């Protein structure tokens, strides 16, 4: 979540709380020209640290008020669309230290460790990634091994929806079993059980997910960073 989106959402909250309607009134309240106020709240203008502190000082707001994420509530509201349009902006998706194996499995990490962030467009996500539980459930991980060739290759970065905890649709899933992480394709059979397999025709990996063994779905792979939608 970018600081700019939070500031825009907080500026909208400021206007709503004070009953301010329209860019003219907003500009007067924050010490900006009408077009500047309009550009700020629409996202067309930059909304940096200096601008935020200047607005707070003019409007009598505590320093840092425009940056207050309210324990994540502002972030969640913007992601869900309650904070207004984000057509102009971007969303940062965490890149996790954990890697999923497209082969024998990799060790499970005890907790989610973020080693970086990659930026995506919310509009690209909404157009391309369907179904999706929510933007805030997206994570990037690395995949390694060759069992999913040619869908994706060793070292590809994968976009995962961690809000998915069951294979309700056929697709590629991140799964945990025997304290290891796997990335495999899952298809439902006619009898209701799920077949787990690899995409590489030279790798004969077929198993059945029927509830008899402890296998947990950790997410669904929705995009490989080689341009392939899954």
Image (spheres, helix red, strand yellow):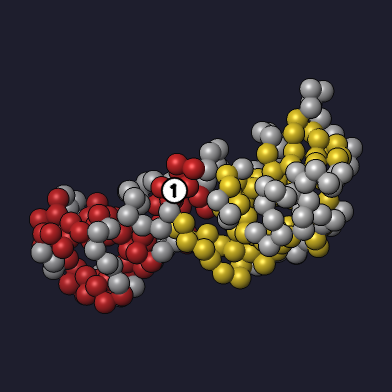
Q: Categorize mark 1 by other alpha carbons within 10 Å: few (<14), some (14-19), many (20+).
A: few
Q: Quadrant of the C terminus?
A: top right
206 relative position to 175: left or right: right
Q: Residue at x 83, y 46 (%)?
A: 202
Depth check, front residue: 178 or 28:
178
Q: Residue at x 47, y 47 (%)?
A: 125
**Which residue in the structure is indicated by mark 1?**
124
Q: Determine which quarter of the picture holds residue 94.
A: bottom right
The answer to whether residue 188 is above or below residue 71 is: above
Residue 70 makes an appearance in the image: no
The answer to whether residue 169 is above or below residue 175 is: above
Q: Position of residue 123 (x, y in %)?
A: 41, 47
Q: Residue at x 67, y 47 (%)?
A: 151
Q: Position of residue 213 (x, y in %)?
A: 88, 42
Depth check, front residue: 200 or 133:
200
Q: Residue at x 16, y 49 (%)?
A: 21
Q: Position of residue 59 (x, y in %)?
A: 19, 68
Depth check, front residue: 141 or 71:
141
């Amino acid at each position: 979540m970018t600081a700019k989106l939070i500031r825009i959402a907080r500026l909208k909250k400021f206007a709503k709380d004070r009953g301010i309607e329209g860019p003219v009134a907003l500009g007067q309240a924050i010490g900006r020209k009408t077009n500047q106020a309009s550009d700020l709240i629409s996202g067309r203008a930059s909304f940096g640290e200096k601008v935020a502190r200047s607005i707070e000082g003019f409007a009598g707001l505590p320093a840092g008020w425009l940056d207050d994420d309210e324990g994540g509530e502002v972030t969640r509201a913007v992601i869900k669309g309650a904070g207004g349009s984000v057509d102009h902006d971007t969303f940062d998706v965490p890149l996790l230290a954990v890697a999923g194996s497209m082969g024998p499995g990799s060790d499970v990490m005890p907790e989610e460790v973020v080693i970086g962030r990659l930026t995506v467009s919310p509009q690209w996500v909404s157009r391309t990634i369907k179904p999706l539980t929510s933007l805030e459930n997206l994570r990037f991980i690395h995949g390694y091994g060759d069992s999913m060739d040619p869908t994706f290759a060793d070292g590809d970065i994968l976009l995962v929806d961690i809000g998915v905890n069951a294979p309700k649709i056929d697709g590629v899933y991140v799964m945990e079993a025997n304290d290891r992480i796997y990335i495999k394709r899952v298809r439902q059979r006619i009898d209701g059980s799920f077949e787990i397999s690899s995409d590489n025709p030279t790798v004969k990996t077929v198993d059945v997910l029927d509830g008899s063994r402890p296998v947990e779905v950790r997410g669904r792979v929705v995009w490989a960073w080689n341009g392939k939608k899954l």
